[in-house]
Image (cartoon, rainbow, N blue to C red):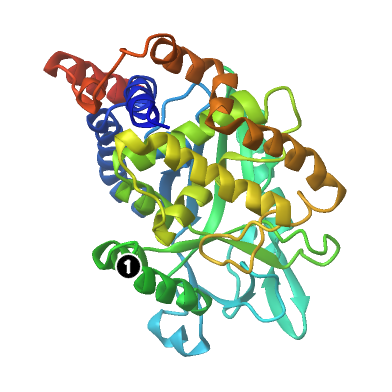
Amino acid sequence: MDQIPRLSEVLYVGLCRKIGTPTEVAIRRDVIDIEEMIRKPYFNHKGCGVMESGSFREGFRFESSDFDKMRWFCHYKLITDISQFRLFNASKHLIVLMEDSDTSPGFVRLRLLTPARDEITISCLVLFNGGVYITSPLWRETLLQILNGSSSNSLNFRIHGPCSSWVIDFHEFDEAFCLASFPWPKLLGSWVDRCQRHTWPSVPVLEKILKNECHCVPIGSKVDMTSNELEWRLSFSQAEHQLVCTMNHTQFLCYGLLKIFLKEVVNYRKEPLLCSYYMKTTVFWMMQLGHVRWCPNNLLDCFWKCFKYLLYCVYHGLFPNFFIPENSMFLKKIVEGARSSPLQQLYQYYRMGVSCLLLSPTLRSILEPALSSPSFELSADDGEFMSIADLDICGMIEIYI
């Protein structure tokens, strides 16, 4: 145990070089922020909003970093209460009421309150209980047909979850055509109360999150696959990005460490029952619960506490969504018989302790010098320092990437 702080700092420095220093990560995010700010007037003129999401947007530059984008039409106005109808011009906007009664946790139905005037909307409507609703499968298929039918595109788009997906040079791109909700749904009141109770995120960050939209993406729950065509999943990508940006660098590297361990060890040559989103959610829960000391010389302990939380969730077959805990993200994926395989696998790693990190080629290459030489030491400054020339190169790469 006496070696844990030393090995943690060595791992911290190695991950800074592998994942990025605090300044590098800040540059990556700033370049995308500036790009979105410049393009925003153009997209608004076109009547849509666009935002980057996913690990690339968060500041990671792994070869497998996903390129995710969300796009929404600005003339759709989603409201959470019928009294908000008067806030919008019904002659210009399509006003849609989000209904969360009799839906799975984290999912809503979208009831159209004004006449549909465009072909996309009209093609996605069905009657239900005396109302007109937008169905998520028809929405996905309609947008997919438009993309594949475009004469300017030679790409083969396909449906991937709620997204339209395509591949360029072995990189997968996902774009979700969603609908934006402002204000936030009322059912998120308990999440706001929890944030205030645990004092994370801070009040300014929480206020910033609540001033932005959340989104509805076109996919239903997996509770009952035969009756979920009216359901849309609530997405909090903007809020998640804000939360990732509040992380100190130890927290961000721990998140990256979990992603590396997941890819190179847990999911290596196996059916990926666990996904990267679980790793991010785990770090969010650990940050909010406040039982972890997040600093470079404690990085191994940070990883281990996150790992034990993940193991606990797999053992119980419940993985609570950070925003809506009633929504178990393991539902229909890691239950009953399907749970035994990842549970046995994770328990083997648990018995190994933090040495299970050596199963990863990337992490082993970082730790081996310190393990083979008790005198080998690195301070956090060794990983965080970059020359002005290197920072200029980093900025140029991000601009032309």
Q: Which residue is mark 1?
A: 199
Locate residue 166: give its quadrant: top right
Q: Residue 25 appears at what percent x and percent y?
A: 30, 32
Q: Residue at image x 52%, y 50%?
A: 282
Of residues 380 and 193, the one drawn nearer to the viewer in this rendering: 380
Horizontal side of residue 80 vs 268, given as left or right: left
Amino acid type at mark 1: Thr
Q: Quadrant of the C terminus?
A: top left
In the shown orientation, is residue 169 left or right of residue 255? right
Using the rendered image of the protein, determine whether residue 172 is visible from the camera's viewpoint: no
Q: Is residue 22 visible?
A: yes
Q: Is residue 226 above or below residue 298?
A: below
Q: Is residue 226 above or below residue 386?
A: below
Expressed as whole percent of the image width and height from the top left, the position of residue 35 reads: 29, 38
Residue 77 placement (x, y as % from top left): 47, 71
Mark 1 Cα shell of 10 Å, populated few (<14), some (14-19), many (≥20): some
Tell me if 337 is positioned left or right of 128 in this view. right
Which SS class for mark 1? loop
Query: Which residue is rendered at x = 69% and y = 77% of the image?
Result: 132
Image coords of residue 94 (percent x, y): 52, 72
Q: Which residue occupies the foreground of this view, 288 or 85?
A: 288
